[in-house]
Image (tube, coloured by chain):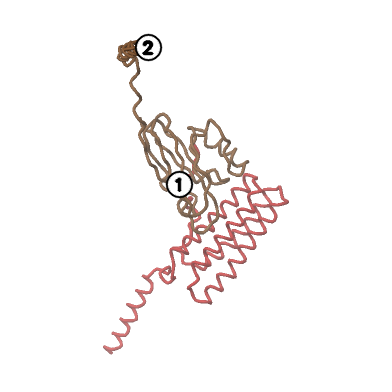
Chain colours: A red, B brown
Amino acid sequence: MKRNRTIQAAVAVIGVLAVAVPLSAQLKSPDDVKTALRLLVQVSNDFKRQITNKNFSRVPHEYMEYTEAADALRSAIKDEPAAFKSKVETRLKAAVTAAQHVSDMSGTASDADKLMAEHAKAVTAMNAVFELFPADLRPDPNTPPPGRRGRS
Amino acid sequence: MTPSLSRRALLRALLAGLMPLTACRRRTPPAPKKDVDLFIASDGDFLAFRPDELTCPAGAHVHLTFHHTGKFLNAVHNWVLVQPGQMEAVDKYAEKHDGAVAPGDPRVIAVAPMCGKGETVRTEFIAPAAGDYPFFCSTPGHAEDMNGILHVTK
């Protein structure tokens, strides 16, 4: 009876500890992952800005940066288990393909609304990547970028 | 003593006599400009300057160093200091010219050239009159987030 209680207590302690340790601690390079996810959001926002400003010729450049941010994420998870890397890669590829579609469209389209609709699809694909990572590493969409955000 | 030497001696004496007078009329030489070193960097690959506020005294000879601390993205950055209220207009021009600032633009006080990740560039300028002067990165699309203020003190 006493032994059972001891085992139960031990299991409870392990359970509490498991919950208390943040999920991000299970990743080998949580800071690099956090940076890479933030970069994806930053470049995605730049896409949006160039489309809004009808600066379509800059959109392919943003796509190039998006692929670089995707590579930063690949590098950040290189030491993770193969199954996890494979899951991320599948969704990341989908996100990059969606971004490429926006870039390709920008070469001929002059309709900002159409491009924005396509960009929204790319954002959905990007969010699917984020879902694979602990919440404390995901960029907060409501947080403004680190810059001053203002013109004088 | 030959007559030519005596004339020369006379001339020397005359000049020596005038020297104190000219010295009196000369203005006090301007105080040498104070040299100030400023350092600024990008916030890694993010669109921000660190720090985003700098300070120097008016009239100082400023030596500014800008370091691009990015590691992942191949985006280039620069540092452009402009007259108050001119950032948007200068940036608009740069957006249409692949980030370039018009040479001799009177709205522009100083420019540190474009550089890639890991690179460092420098510029020098004489700090303008006291006031707050905006600076920004003129790569198209960067200025909105990547900007700051140079506080020039009296």
Task: Give the mark toward the camera: 1 or 2.
Answer: 2
In the image, A6: left or right of B84? left
Instruction: Give the chain letter at badge 1.
Output: B
**CA–CA distance in space, label 1 to label 2:** 63 Å
Check disc 1 and give the amino acid type.
Phe
How many residues crowd around disc 1 within 10 Å: few (fewer than 14), some, or many (20 or more)? many
Q: Which mark is residue A148?
A: none
Q: Residue furthest left?
A: A2
Q: Position of residue B106 (x, y in %)?
A: 53, 30
- The one nearer the camera, A90 or A72, is A72
- The one nearer the camera, B10 or A37, is B10
Say which quadrant the N terminus of chain A sits in: bottom left
Check disc 2 and give the amino acid type.
Ser
Name the residue rendered at 34%, 81% in the picture.
A11
* Count of numbered marks: 2
Dot 2 lies on which element? Answer: helix
How many residues crowd around disc 2 within 10 Å: few (fewer than 14), some, or many (20 or more)? few
| Callout 1 and callout 2 share a chain | yes
In the image, A15: left or right of A59? left
Q: Position of residue A39 (x, y in %)?
A: 52, 57
Instruction: Tell me which corner region of the image, top left, top right, bottom left or bottom right, holds residue B130.
Output: top left
Q: Which residue is mark 2?
A: B4
Q: Position of residue B86 (x, y in %)?
A: 52, 33
Whichever of labels 1 and 2 marks the residue nearer the N terminus, that label is: 2
- The one nearer the camera, A151 or B75, is B75
In the image, B4: left or right of B122? left
Q: Residue furthest front?
A: B2
Instruction: Tell me which corner region of the image, top left, top right, bottom left or bottom right, holds residue A100.
Output: bottom right
Q: Which residue is mark 1?
A: B66
Instruction: Give the chain letter at badge 2.
Output: B
Q: Is residue B144 above or below residue A127?
A: above
Dot 1 lies on which element? Answer: strand
